[in-house]
Image (cartoon, rainbow, N blue to C red):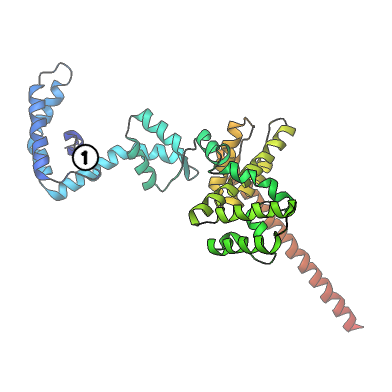
Amino acid sequence: MNENCYLLLELEFDPPVKDQAVIDQRIEEKAKFWSTNSNHFKKGAEYKTYLEMLPEIKKIMSDPVKRKGEADSACSIVYGPIDQDLKVLGTTGEIAENVIENYANTKKISLNVIKKRVSTLEIKIIQKVDFQITYDKYYKNKPKNAETFDGMKTYLKPFNKDDFYAFLNPGTMQNMDKLPCDKLKQLAQEKKKKEFYKNDTYSSAGKKVCEACELAFKDESSKTIYDDYLAWCKRRSILDNAKEIAKITGKKMSDEQGDIYIGKLTELLKDRTLAENIFISFCKIEKIEYNPDLYNPGKKEDKARKKAEEEARKKVGEEARKKAEEEARKKVEEEARKK
């Protein structure tokens, strides 16, 4: 029998339906449908053929071993052409999520099925980036209490400090942002008491900052709010600088220039992919012309290959130079011994 039973009966095959009662019911439903439509002007002959195949269908679908073979065969029939297409679309080992969606829509196949096949083929899915949402989240939207913290910058200026951590640091402590809230509050209270006890402008500014520190580090929740604010400020600073450079270059950004800013964001975020997404989204919304290698994996790989080849050539050249120097040294020593 050439027809696949799972496909003929329109039963799920991945994972396959195994419940015999469900299978028998579907066979009965299909038999009734084929019989009722056996005189259909287009498909009547086809349905009559299926009716003749019923004994064989029942035999196969009641045998667990043969049934498994039918399920495997159905996977090959249905997924074979899909897998071939996905291998072409994912020749670089990666495939963009929007490409997967377009393929699913074009072929009228469930998106989940396509994603499952991509995963089975071990092709990496590049998540779709919503430029506006990413831009708003990481650049435009001010974090909680941003206005309050911005207002404190005026009071930090006399001390040449940019943030509360730097202000509280006595000059020797590392990783101030990792200190517990109790310790940070203690530093603020001690600083206010020891350094800002006078009735002058300097002490007044210092007291205000100390009190703001006590509020910012009241507990872990408030500390997180302040840390989020600082992270936002740093991101904006990096991206604002990119915007200034882009203005000078006619709203254009080269791959090399983009790599500099992505590198800075990566250092801040500890996530290269997120940094790339943020920078690309920023450029898209700000209408900065930037065409990164991220959208051209082949070009990126080619650059990496050329770089590796160049480093290899340098290494070979260095080794050859050292070898020549060693041979020359030995020759001089040999001639000296002969004399």
- Quarter of the picture containing the C terminus is bottom right
176 in relation to 239, above or below = below
334 in relation to 205, above or below = below
Q: Quadrant of residue 57?
A: top left
Residue depicted at 49% across the width and 37% down the height: 129
Residue type at the position of mark 1: Glu
- Rendered location of residue 126, percent (x, y): 47, 42
- Rendered location of residue 270, percent (x, y): 56, 53
Residue 124 or residue 288, whichever sits in front = 288
Residue tagged 1: 12
Q: Quadrant of residue 11?
A: top left
Q: Residues within 10 Å of mark 1 (few under 14, many from 20)?
A: few
Left/right placement of residue 234 relative to residue 47 reads: right
Left/right placement of residue 104 relative to residue 250 reads: left
Q: Is residue 206 visible?
A: yes
Residue depicted at 34% across the width and 43% down the height: 116
